[in-house]
Amino acid sequence: MAEYIEREQAIQYIRYQLMSAPSANVKPVVHGHWIDDDETDRCKCSVCGTLYNWFDNAFLHEANYCPYCGTRMDEE
């Protein structure tokens, strides 16, 4: 004997499963790049504009994100 399920019951079950799934608390990814200022030996984030001194520049150019705002530094 075959087992059947009514369409409305199936829809209600799927809807319940979707509504009970946990939601994610996420932040959108922001892309930016480092802007060099040769006159002051500083660089800044293209998104938040935070300035970093020359000593930090060596670290920042290797970093893939801004330590202040979290911008991902993968933009050309």
Image: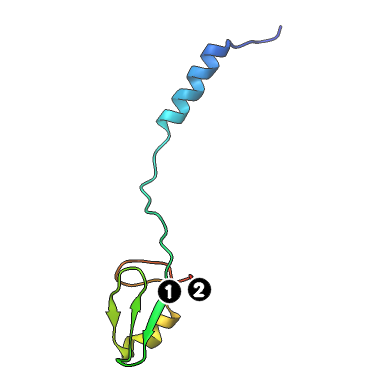
Q: CA distance from mark 1 to mark 2?
A: 7 Å
* Residue carrying label 2: 76
Whole-percent x, y for residue 22 in the image: 40, 38
Q: Amino acid at mark 1?
A: His
Total count of labels: 2
* In this view, 8 is above or below 41: above
Image-quadrant location for residue 6: top right
Name the residue nearer the viewer: 2 or 34.
Answer: 34
Q: Residue most toward the front?
A: 39
**Which residue type does callout 2 highlight?**
Glu
The residue furthest top is: 1
State the residue in front, 50 or 60. 50
In the picture of the structure, the residue carrying the numbered disc 1 is: 33
User: For residue 71, what is the image quadrant?
Assistant: bottom left
Disc 2, SS: loop
**CB under 8 Å between callouts 1 and 2?**
yes
What residue is rendered at 52% in x and 13% in y? 9
Image quarter in which the N terminus is found: top right
Q: Nearer the viewer, residue 35 or 3?
A: 35
Find the residue positioned furthest to the right: 1
Horizontal side of residue 54 vs 13, given as left or right: left
Residue at 29% over, 87% down: 53
**Above or below, 24 relative to 42:** above
Going from N to C along the chain, the mark reached first, 1 or 2, is: 1
Q: Nearer the viewer, residue 23 or 65?
A: 65
State the residue at coordinates (51%, 24%): 14
Question: Picture coordinates of residue 57 (x, y %)?
Answer: 36, 86
